[in-house]
Image: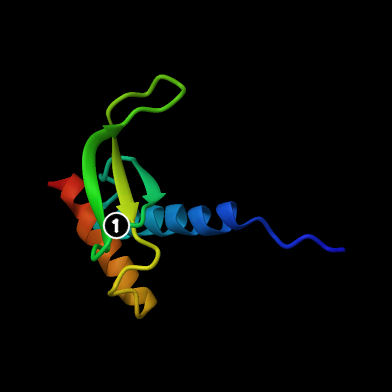
Amino acid sequence: MTRAPAITPIEYSGLQTAYDHFNAELFEGSLLDVFITYQRKANSAGYFAPERYSSRVGTDGQHELALNPHSPDETAISGTFGTVFDYYSASYR
């Protein structure tokens, strides 16, 4: 039996690739790093939480960007990435 590709690297690497691309193209690489998570919060496309995430390797105060993979406005990829960059740009301000 052939094992299907692991879902986690597929999902999260795509988000990181998009973040890196738009950070370079729209913000000249000046956005801070964020920890991207999927969170299911009712009636929400996601949220941005500054300095909320503390890693296991001693990096405290990282920004968290939580996205709802089944948000109400996820009718198209453009809607999802529009939400992503609304939150990303909040870290720029």
Q: Tell me what residue is drawn at x 38 percent, y 75 percent.
A: 77
The structure residue drawn at horizontal position 23% and vertical position 66%, both measured from the top left corner, is 43
Q: What's the amino acid at mark 1?
A: Lys
**Is 29 in front, or is 67?**
67
Toward the viewer: 40 or 34? 40
- Most extreme residue toward the front is 42
Say which quadrant the N terminus sits in.
bottom right
> Residue visible at 35% across and 27% down?
54
Q: Position of residue 56 (x, y in %)?
A: 45, 24
Residue that label 1 marks: 41
Q: Answer with the quarter of the image where residue 22 lies.
A: bottom left
Q: Secondary structure at mark 1?
A: loop
Q: Position of residue 71 (x, y in %)?
A: 32, 68
Measured along the vertical axis of the image, is residue 48 above or below residue 78? above
Q: Looking at the image, is 14 positioned above or below residue 82?
A: above
Callout count: 1
